[in-house]
Structure formats: structure tokens, C-alpha cells
Image (tube, rainbow, N blue to C red):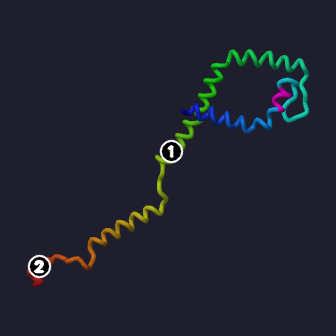
Amino acid sequence: MRKLGVYLIMIIGAILLAPFVIDQLFFFFFLGKIPFTNISLPAILMVIFWAIIVPLAIILRESLSVLFWKFIDIASEIAQRRINRKIRYFTPNQKSELILLSIYLLSSMKKSEPYDEIESQKLAPSMT
């Protein structure tokens, strides 16, 4: 499911960026013009570029895919750790201790409200 999400984001991003960069990519692939500049590479550099890139892409096809998905997994693990850390180490601020103390005092006061009947205490014989 995560791979599908990454694929969808990449496809949507490519569709959104295509109108702005497609002509620059064509100029680079076929004419050797560096995108978004007026610098053109000589023909020999483009031949060397394609002579290196195509075999590397074929040879490293599987390892690049594995490397890409490993990078995605690491990024998601880091994000998940951050979320777990926020939940695990959530500590209320210092004012909460005062709030808890006041709640305790109020609850103990409620137990001894003046409206409650107080049992008659046994007085010492000398006091009667």
C-alpha cells in the first residue's frame, strides 16, 4: 500500500511538472542543452554521458530500486519514531502538579462537608 502511495505521488508530480519541464528535458536528451540555462554540451560529452548512463541504468536497475525503497522505509521509520516519542515522552507541564494537588484537596474537602451528619464522638468520662 505504501508503494502504491509513492507511485501515485510520483505520477501526480510528474503530470503537474510536465508542462514546465518537458521541453527542457527534450532539449537535454536530444541537443545536450543543460536545463534552464543556455549552456549546450558538446556532442562528445553527450555521447560519453549516454555511454555511461545507459549501461549503469541496466546494471544497477535492481539495486537502485532497492535503494529507493530502503530510503522510503528509513524515512517512514524516522517519522514513526518521532510520533512514538511524542506519545511516550508526553509529560504535562509543571502547572499540572498544582492542578492535581488542588483536585485532591477539593475531593478531601468534599468528604467532610458541613452538611453531612457527623457521628457523635465518644467523649472522655472526665468531659461528660
Picture residue at 75% right of the left edge, 17% below the top: 54
Where on the picture, by quarter, is residue 82?
A: top right
* Whether label 1 touches label 2, CB < 8 Å: no
Please tell me which residue is depicted at 37% across the width and 66% down the height of the picture. 103
Seen from this angle, which residue lies furthest bottom? 128
User: In this picture, is 111 found above or below 41?
Assistant: below
Residue 66: give x, y in percent of width and height. Answer: 61, 23
Judging depth in this view, the residue of 47 and 74 nearest the camera is 47
Q: Is residue 100 left or right of residue 111?
A: right
| Tag 1: amino acid | Arg
Q: Where is residue 111 in the image (x, y as percent from the top left)?
A: 27, 71
User: Residue at the location (85% across, 20% down)?
Assistant: 46
Vertical comparison of 125 with 58: above or below: below
Q: What stretch is highlighted in magenta?
A: 23-28
Tell me, for residue 85, which label it has, or none.
1
Judge by depth and name the residue closer to the eye, 78 or 4: 4
Q: Does the magenta stretch include residue 116?
A: no
Quarter of the picture containing the N terminus is top right
Label 2 secondary element: loop
> Relative to 94, is 29 on the left or the right?
right
Work out whether residue 98 or residue 55 is closer to the camera in this orientation and state it: 55
Residue 86 image position (x, y, % from top left): 51, 47
Q: Measure how far apart labels 1 and 2 are at the Cα level.
A: 61 Å
Q: Callout 2 environment at 10 Å: few (<14), some (14 to 19), or many (20+)?
A: few
Helix, strand or loop for disc 1:
helix
The main secondary structure of the magenta stretch is helix
Q: Residue 31: percent from the left, percent from the top?
A: 88, 24
Q: Which of marks 1 and 2 is nearer the N terminus?
A: 1
**Residue receiving disc 2:** 124
